[in-house]
Amino acid sequence: MSRIAVFFVLVLFSCQGQSTNKAQQKTDTVDAKIIVPKNNTVSCEQVVTQLVKSSNAIAFSQFGDTLVQAAVAYLGPEKLTIKLYVINDISENPLEKRLVEHAVGWLEFHQKTRQLLDITNDPDNPLILRYDRRIAQEHDLSKLCSSTTAMTKSSKGHTLWDVMLDEDIKFNGKLDRFFTRSDFEKVFGRPDSIRLLKDESPCVTIFDTEAPDDKYLYKSGSRFETSGDRVAVEEFWFLNGNFITYNGIRIDANTTMQDMKRLFPTAVRERQEMDKAGKLWLITLLQDNEGILDGHIKMYFKDGKAQSIHWWSPC
């Protein structure tokens, strides 16, 4: 009788153990589904936007999370560079909208550590952001965004770095990049010298007219191209008090590379030393948000301060 009782107890414990194990396995499976759901319908843009919106990025305190939008500007093997931007209507005609993007922040998402960094103010000393880490756990951003080539590269194959739009620039706080000959003399005075384009033999021109009387105007190191009464800036030097404003921010001979980080953090981080003898540093800026234009803007720095800005186009 005692042997039967012992056998019954052993069977009872065995059944309870199997039941407990099955319950534990069921709980683990449910938890795993909650943590890592399989969702193949979301896009890279949707996940990145969701991740960024859950963070305490600096741009949100200035513009609000409803206005700020996010897009992957560059996808590298270890990190994603994310552009934060707002869309503004710069049209002077209320009946005709003219929408442009303005960058208001830059983030980096490091895929290995899953750190989200705000590099807007100082790329060398980024701010570590808080965000909903479940989003990064649920989605492999590297795989999800790798096929989104339109977000990482333009149709011309250029990496989308920082953009400097002509319409946001004012020369000496007054002139757009294109203006008239009378405007030139009002703001800059008479040119120091004048040369015909045909004598300079440039490989590419701004107005592309090839007119025999097209000229270059030189003033305080700067070079301006003319065609008839039209004038355009080709190269502008920050000499004799000359300056530009970009979105209302002044850039002149006292502007440092550190100052430029606030406007163009990616370009500053990817700067190149072009002239070893003169120690000229160069940052490169695209001229449009879509990356369609072949040319770009080069800004040179000497001894850590802005020296000149040049509109470059391939021959």
Image (cartoon, rainbow, N blue to C red):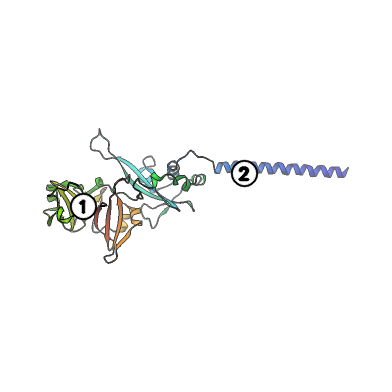
Q: Secondary structure at mark 1?
A: strand
Amino acid carrying mark 1 in the image? Glu
**Where does the image place residue 2, in percent across and percent down from the top left?**
87, 44
Residue 71 visible, this orientation: no
Residue type marked 2: Asp
Displayed quadrant of residue 45: top left
Q: Nearer the viewer, residue 60 or 161?
A: 161
Neighbor class of circle 2 (other Cα within 10 Å; few <14, some 14-19, many 20+) is few
Q: Marks 1 and 2, Cα distance to the nearest angstrom?
A: 65 Å
Residue that extends furthest to the right in the rendered view of this protein: 1
* Disc 2: which residue: 28
Circle on res. 234:
1
Residue 3, numbered label: none
Answer yes or no: is residue 300 visible. yes
**Residue at position x 32%, y 58% from top?**
258
- Residues marked 1 and 2 touching at CB (< 8 Å): no
The percent position of residue 178, horizontal first and vertical second, equals: 19, 46
Above/below status of 310 relative to 13: below
Where residue 230 sits: x, y (%)? 15, 46
Image quadrant holding the N terminus, namely top right
